[in-house]
């Protein structure tokens, strides 16, 4: 308590200094604010923005840890050093320290760069504008490493984070004012600026660049390459992964997006903690299912033949779309962003359904980048205020009609 009071007194003495918002951010991160209300309060709750952000982070931590094991597992599997896991979540070949260490040393730098650069930008804007540092980037900083390929260069990630924080959030006024999800804005920047790095059609293997150079120079080594499930389906190839592999997450892909099982558990945690909207999650799944069923019906009717470049993903069983790619992760952790999502109850159903519907539509008809959830969520972020506007106006008209009937 003595240290806390000393820090509080230090803050009070320097409260007019330009750099004090940066100090306040560190102080309130370590301690509860040493402030009390002077007037009567109407609502008393234990929640605040920091606790809400921490709840979302806790829901994502299992995906992060699993992603570390999976990165090492995919590395050793591609090199032929281990056999493929037989589909058990408790497989001893997957949960090994060797797999974890390989993934840990590759993924932790992504987390450090994401938080270091992003929070640095937040601190700079807080000092320049003289406002408090907001906790909104706590979630974005964790989301970003989970939705990018494990082999993305750190400098590239840093540039994207700067763009996403400045253009995606700060120019709109900071946390709570942005119209686009900052994490998806960062990924969209990477997708359009560095598309070859974001294609997701290769498995990261430690030392693969050096090995490929040795192969190119004529040395007798096996090539190191691999494809994600979506990459293979987009090219009409057979997928070697079982349904259990895809559900548990023993597949290549972005760090946090492979394990549908852990994503679902994280989603349930958000729902029961009242942080995430179950309406958006459920309606997103329903939208994806409807679009998947439509494509399956088109294939069954014979309107699309095997020679078509769209056949692979269109013929994919409708519910498989929920297990592959980043759909589940996007629907649970990004579509439910309370700032950029629809706010009305009916609007959430429409908003989520269109995200799922458009995600599978883009996934099928964009074979160069067979993933659509990022673009679908960003598109619906833009239309969320419009959806809410018409929902509210519709309710107003209904009430006005009831008033006219009663007055008559």
Image: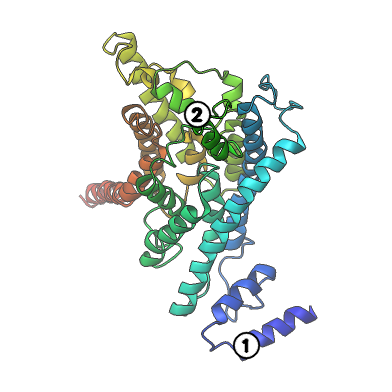
Q: Is residue 242 left or right of residue 170?
A: right
Is residue 380 something one can see in this rendering? yes
Q: Name which residue lies at 47% across and 22% down.
A: 319
Q: Is residue 211 left or right of residue 312?
A: right
Q: Name which residue lies at 58% across and 18% down.
A: 242
Q: Quadrant of residue 241?
A: top right
| Label of residue 147 in the image | none
Residue occupying the far left of the picture:
408
Q: Quadrant of residue 83?
A: top right
Is residue 48 something one can see in this rendering? no
Secondary structure category for the residue under label 2 = loop
Q: Name which residue lies at 79% across and 78% down.
A: 1
Q: Is residue 35 left or right of residue 127?
A: right
Secondary structure category for the residue under label 1 = helix
- Read off the residue under disc 1: 12
- Read off the residue under disc 2: 228
Percent position of residue 353, x then y: 38, 35
Task: Return the residue nearer the eye: 126 or 343.
Answer: 126
């Amino acid at each position: 308590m003595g240290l806390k009071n000393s820090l509080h007194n230090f803050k009070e003495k320097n409260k007019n200094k330009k750099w004090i918002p940066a100090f306040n951010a560190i102080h309130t991160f370590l301690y509860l604010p040493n402030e009390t209300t002077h007037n009567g309060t109407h609502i008393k709750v234990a929640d605040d923005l920091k606790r809400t952000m921490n709840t979302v982070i806790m829901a994502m931590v299992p995906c992060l840890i699993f992603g570390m094991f999976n990165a090492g597992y995919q590395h050793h599997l591609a090199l032929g050093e281990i056999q493929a896991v037989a589909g058990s979540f408790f497989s001893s070949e997957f949960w090994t320290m060797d797999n974890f260490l390989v993934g840990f040393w590759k993924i932790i730098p992504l987390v450090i760069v994401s938080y270091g650069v992003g929070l640095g930008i937040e601190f700079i804007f807080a000092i320049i504008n003289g406002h408090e540092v907001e906790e909104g980037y706590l979630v974005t900083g964790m989301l970003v490493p989970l939705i990018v390929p494990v082999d993305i260069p750190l400098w590239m990630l840093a540039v994207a984070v700067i763009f996403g924080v400045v253009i995606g959030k700060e120019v709109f006024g900071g946390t709570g004012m942005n119209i686009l999800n900052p994490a998806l804005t960062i990924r969209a920047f990477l997708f359009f600026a560095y598309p070859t790095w974001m294609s997701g059609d290769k498995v990261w293997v430690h030392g693969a660049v050096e090995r490929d150079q040795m192969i190119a120079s004529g040395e007798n080594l096996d090539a190191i390459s691999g494809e994600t499930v979506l990459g293979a389906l987009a090219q009409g190839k057979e997928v070697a992964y079982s349904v259990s592999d895809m559900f548990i997450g023993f597949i290549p892909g972005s760090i946090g997006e492979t394990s549908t099982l852990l994503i679902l558990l994280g989603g349930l945690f958000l729902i029961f903690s009242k942080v995430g909207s179950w309406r958006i999650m459920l309606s997103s799944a329903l939208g994806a299912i409807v679009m998947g069923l439509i494509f399956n019906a088109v294939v069954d009717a014979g309107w699309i033949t095997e020679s078509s470049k769209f056949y692979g993903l269109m013929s994919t069983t409708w519910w498989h779309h929920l297990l592959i790619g980043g759909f589940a992760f996007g629907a649970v952790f990004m579509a439910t962003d309370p700032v950029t999502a629809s706010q009305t109850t009916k609007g959430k159903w429409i908003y989520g359904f269109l995200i799922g519907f458009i995600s599978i539509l883009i996934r099928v008809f964009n074979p160069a980048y067979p993933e659509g959830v990022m673009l679908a969520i960003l598109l619906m972020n833009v239309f969320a205020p419009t959806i809410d506007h018409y929902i509210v106006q519709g309710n107003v008209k209904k009430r006005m009609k009831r008033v006219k009937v009663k007055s008559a």
